Image: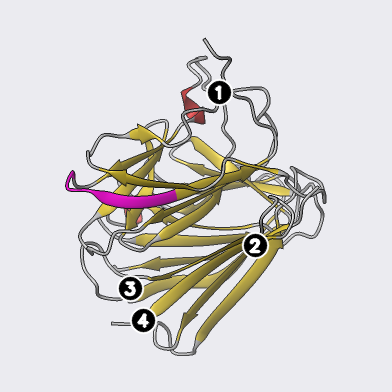
């Protein structure tokens, strides 16, 4: 097992009347256990030049039993410096939200299988708002990984 | 305007052969601008008794789609197998197990885009906060 820690701090002196100073930290464990997660896709850095919706983890088998009931964590960061540039994040076409310039997300991901058997819910998708080129970083830290068989 | 900064750090000395040490900071700003977010809901805690499956934490119809909403969620449980399932517009996003937290943007594009949570056990407590520009 490995010990991986994810920490978040949110600070503001003027968002609310009192100073906001939120800090939290947790170790990434396998689902329902205290055993550390031990796999990762590695960090991707990508320069995207189209507004096309893309699958950011294309090498993983969607809806794979390897992911069923397992714990997966996704990090995505929009590295753009232009405040008007954002990325729309979706899971199987369902909009989660927009990542504006400099924003990041950190969320669990069930990779649940489509009830219709299309297995599309394994897709986390990202669509840049402009085609003039935007930088992104993303990675997944997880347990249970299944890759497609080579053809 | 307000200045609110969120910083994530992900670190491990043994997930990979080389040490992992990722740190990113973001100043939370509004839609298509550099003005700091000025609105917040929370920090709050919600205890969910039994029978609260698919509890609506935030109703999508209460917020505007083209805004820069950001949501913080934390499962305060200390029992490893207790989880909250997070659902957006019927899409299961993922499970927050004991101590886990998440921070992600939210597009409240219509009333179907509610943020819903589903505890795996009774009397679980979720901590949450919404940052928004409306």
First-in-chain label (3 vs 4): 4
Neighbour tally class for label 2: few under 14, some 14-19, many 20 plus, Cα within 10 Å: some
Q: Which of the numbered marks, if any, corresponds to residue B3?
A: 4
First-in-chain label (2 vs 3): 2
Q: Which of the numbered marks, if any, corresponds to residue B37?
A: 3
Q: CA distance from mark 4 to mark 2?
A: 26 Å
- Check the picture and name the quadrant holding the N terminus of chain B: bottom left
Q: Residue at x 55, y 82 (%)?
A: A21
Q: CA distance from mark 3 to mark 4?
A: 7 Å
Image x and y of residue A142, in percent: 65, 42
First-in-chain label (4 vs 2): 4
Is label 4 in a helix, a strand or a loop? loop
Residue under mark 1: which chain is it in?
A: A
Q: Residue at x 27, y 67 (%)?
A: B30
Of tags 2 and 3, which is closer to the observer?
2
Q: CA distance from mark 1 to mark 2?
A: 27 Å
Q: Which of the numbered marks, if any, corresponds to residue A61?
A: 1
Magenta includes A134? yes
């Amino acid at each position: 097992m490995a010990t991986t820690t994810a920490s978040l701090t949110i600070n503001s002196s003027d968002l609310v009347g009192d100073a906001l100073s939120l800090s939290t930290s947790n170790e990434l464990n396998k689902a329902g256990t205290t055993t550390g997660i031990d796999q990762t896709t590695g960090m991707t850095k990508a320069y995207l030049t189209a507004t096309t919706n893309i699958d950011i983890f294309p090498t993983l088998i969607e809806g794979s039993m390897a992911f069923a009931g397992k714990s997966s964590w996704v990090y995505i960061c929009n590295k753009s410096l232009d405040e008007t540039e954002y990325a729309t994040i979706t899971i199987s076409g369902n909009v989660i939200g927009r990542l504006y310039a400099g924003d990041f997300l950190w969320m669990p991901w069930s990779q649940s299988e489509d009830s219709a058997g299309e297995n599309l819910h394994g897709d986390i998708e990202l669509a840049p708002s402009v085609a003039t080129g935007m930088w992104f970083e993303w990675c997944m830290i997880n347990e249970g990984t299944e890759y497609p068989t080579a053809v | 305007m307000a200045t609110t900064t969120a910083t994530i750090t992900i670190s491990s000395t043994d997930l990979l052969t080389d040490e992992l040490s990722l740190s990113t900071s973001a100043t939370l700003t509004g839609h298509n601008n550099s003005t700091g977010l000025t609105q917040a809901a929370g920090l709050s805690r919600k205890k969910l008794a039994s029978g609260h499956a698919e509890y609506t934490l935030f109703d999508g119809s209460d917020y505007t789609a083209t805004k820069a909403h950001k949501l913080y969620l934390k499962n305060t449980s200390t029992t490893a197998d207790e989880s909250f399932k997070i659902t957006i517009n019927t899409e299961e996003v993922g499970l927050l197990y004991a101590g886990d937290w998440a921070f992600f943007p939210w597009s409240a594009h219509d009333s179907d885009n509610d943020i819903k949570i589903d505890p795996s056990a009774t009397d679980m407590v979720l901590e949450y906060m919404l940052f928004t520009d409306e």
